[in-house]
Image: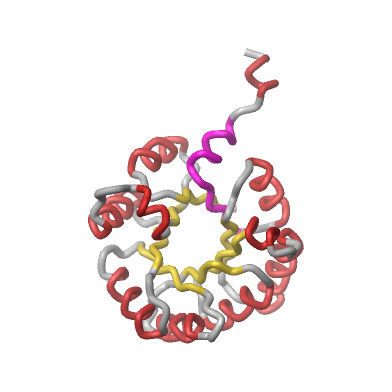
Amino acid sequence: MEIFLDSASITELEHVIKWGIIDGVTTNQKIFLKEKGVNFKERVQDICRILGSKPVSVESNGVTTDEIVNDARTFAKLASNIVPKVPMLGDGSGLEAVSILSGEKIPTNVTVMINLNQLILASKAGATYVSLFYNRAKDAGEDALKIIREYVSWLDRNSLSTKLIAGSIRHPKDVEDIAAAGAHIITIPYDIMLQLPYHKKTEETK
């Protein structure tokens, strides 16, 4: 299982990358809005440079196939380890974008997915990564852990190489549950990441 940091902060990344556990980074527009006054292009390139060859997911603002594809092509030129994010849109235009980008050998991370159907369709379209929004799925009444188990089993049966990223992490226990369910990757916000090494009883033994 791989661990990604869900952040656009250089300070946060430089802190936890020293732990030797970070396999990639995911970002989104909301995260970048928190980083006020930051040049988007320069910040993305800085993150990519720190990560080396490890993947960095960058989100498109597009809402049509052409907009998403054009954003992805632009992102892909910024650094070799960028993975453009593609939204799972209800009209299928996101899937069309994934299919086009897959044909151009541009990796993709299909995001904001809530159920098993969406994960399957994105994988069939050629997604490199698929992102299940774990707690949002639970909020919608889905059994998110069951989705993870069934999707990983489906991937194995169909010999597909897509990797499942579980995001929307709100508590350290989410990380334990998702890891046990078999997700390939968990992307974790900085505030949750900081809680993972700590346990009260461990501290009491010092």
Judge left or right: residue 102 versus residue 117: left
Q: How is the image coloured?
A: secondary structure
**Residue 150 location in percent, x, y?**
74, 68
Q: Residue at x 60, y 53 (%)?
A: 1
Total labels: the figure holds 0
| Quadrant of the rendered image containing residue 44 | bottom left
> In the image, which residues are magenta?
184-197
| Quadrant of the rendered image containing residue 144 | bottom right
Judge left or right: residue 58 versus residue 1: left
Is residue 179 depicted above or below 15 in this figure? below
Is residue 15 depicted above or below 184 in this figure? above
Does the stretch in magenta take in 188? yes
**Residue 116 location in percent, x, y?**
68, 73
Does the stretch in magenta take in 27? no
Q: Residue at x 57, y 60 (%)?
A: 165
Q: In this rendered view, identify the residue nearer to me: 126 or 117.
A: 117
**Residue 184 location in percent, x, y?**
60, 59
**Residue 111 location in percent, x, y?**
52, 68
Q: Residue at x 41, y 53 (%)?
A: 31
Residue 55 visible to an observer of this rendering: no
Residue 79 visible to an observer of this rendering: yes
Q: State which quarter of the image contains the C terminus.
A: top right
Is residue 15 depicted above or below 47 in this figure? above
